[in-house]
Structures are given as C-alpha cells and as structure tokens.
Image (cartoon, grey):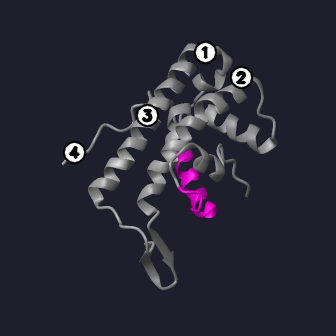
Amino acid sequence: MAYALFVSPDDIVKRTGISGNVDRDQMVQFIKTAQDIHIQALLGTALYDKLKNDVLANTLAGNYATLMNEYVQDVLVHYTMVELMPFLAYKLSNGGVFKKQSENSEGIDKSELEYLIQKERDTAEHYGRRLVSYLTFYGSLTPEYYANQNGEMYPTDGQSFHGWYL
C-alpha cells in the first residue's frame, strides 16, 4: 500500500541540522509517525485525508498546495526531528539493540538530548501555531478543516505539548 508522505527525507536533511549521512530509509518511519500524530491533530482527519489523497494522486494544487508548501511542511520537518532524535544512536537488528558511536565523536547525555528535542518541539509548535492561524483565518479556502465527523480527529490549537511533569 502506498503512503503519502508530505516531506521527503531529503527535506529533513536540507531544513534541519541533521547530518547528510543519516540513512534516509531510517527517516521514513519517523516522518510517517510525525505526520500521523502531529499533522493529523492540527488539520483534523477530513483535511488530512484530503491532502493525503491529493499527494497520492499527484493533484495537489491551488490553496492546498499553498497550505502544504508554506505551512504543513514546516511543522512536519521539525516534528519528524522530535520523533527521530531519540533513536538516531540506536540500531535494532537480529542480534539485539546496539548503540552506534563514531570513532571521532563523543555521545551526549540524556539532558542534552532532551534539550535538543525540546528545541525542535518549540520550533514545530511555532510553525503549528502559524498553521492553525492560517487555517482559522482562511477557513473558507479549505472547507475540510471544519468538516470532521464523529469518529474523526478534530483539529487542535497547535499546543499539544505542555512540558514535563515529574
């Protein structure tokens, strides 16, 4: 089954601080996860499905292309990093789970990783607020934003994360 990704692994490399030598195939699952969790929550199911179908059919145009290119992709790139970063140093294989480390580098501790993830989350939430503002102000351009039915996800306000509680 084909799946419509709203950004490519190359987009992630070009628009973030991730190294160009990261395996692109490793990124795909995290793009899909970020898209399913964060983007669908911001758009609601009806608009999300409309964009997915347009991408699959290669018919994304007009207001929907503007929405995708100028708003959705910015959010998705940074939420992909939020989902990807905790797993970059690990490899799962038949022999178990392994931690990768370069000969000429030093690993970071958990607090440093959490800081970097939070920076990406802050950026994603900023772009998410821009997306929601655009959709709210120009709702007539994308009627699916208000067309969710029972059983579907309704759009959120872009404030999905409210910090850590210990």
The kind of residue on which mark 4 rests is Tyr
Residue 162, picture quadrant: top left
Give the secondary structure at mark 4.
Answer: loop
Q: Position of residue 32 (x, y in %)?
A: 58, 51
Q: Quadrant of the N terminus?
A: bottom right
In the image, residue 89 sits, relative to residue 6, either above or below, namely below
42 and 163: which is toward the camera: 163
Q: Measure how far apart labels 2 and 3 are at the Cα level.
A: 22 Å
Q: Look at the numbered discs 2 and 4 and tell me whether their residues touch, using CB distance below 8 Å.
A: no
Q: Measure how far apart labels 4 and 3 are at the Cα level.
A: 19 Å
The kind of residue on which mark 1 rests is Tyr
Q: State whether the magenta stretch is mostly helix, strand or loop.
A: helix
The kind of residue on which mark 3 rests is Glu
Assess whether residue 131 is covered by the magenta stretch: no
Give the secondary structure at mark 2.
Answer: helix
Which residue is disc 1 drawn over? 138
Residue 151 in sight here: no
Of the two numbered discs 3 and 1 on the same chain, state the one appearing first in sequence.
3
149 and 121: which is toward the camera: 121
Of the two numbered discs 4 and 3 on the same chain, state the one appearing first in sequence.
3
Report the residue at 35% width, 39% height from top.
161
Assess whether residue 24 is covered by the magenta stretch: yes
Where does the magenta region start and end? 19-36
Report the residue at 59% width, 62% height from top.
21
Report the residue at 63% width, 63% height from top.
25
Q: Measure how far apart labels 2 and 1 are at the Cα level.
A: 10 Å
Residue 112, picture quadrant: bottom left
In the image, residue 137 sits, relative to residue 155, either above or below, namely above
Q: Measure how far apart labels 1 and 4 are at the Cα level.
A: 36 Å
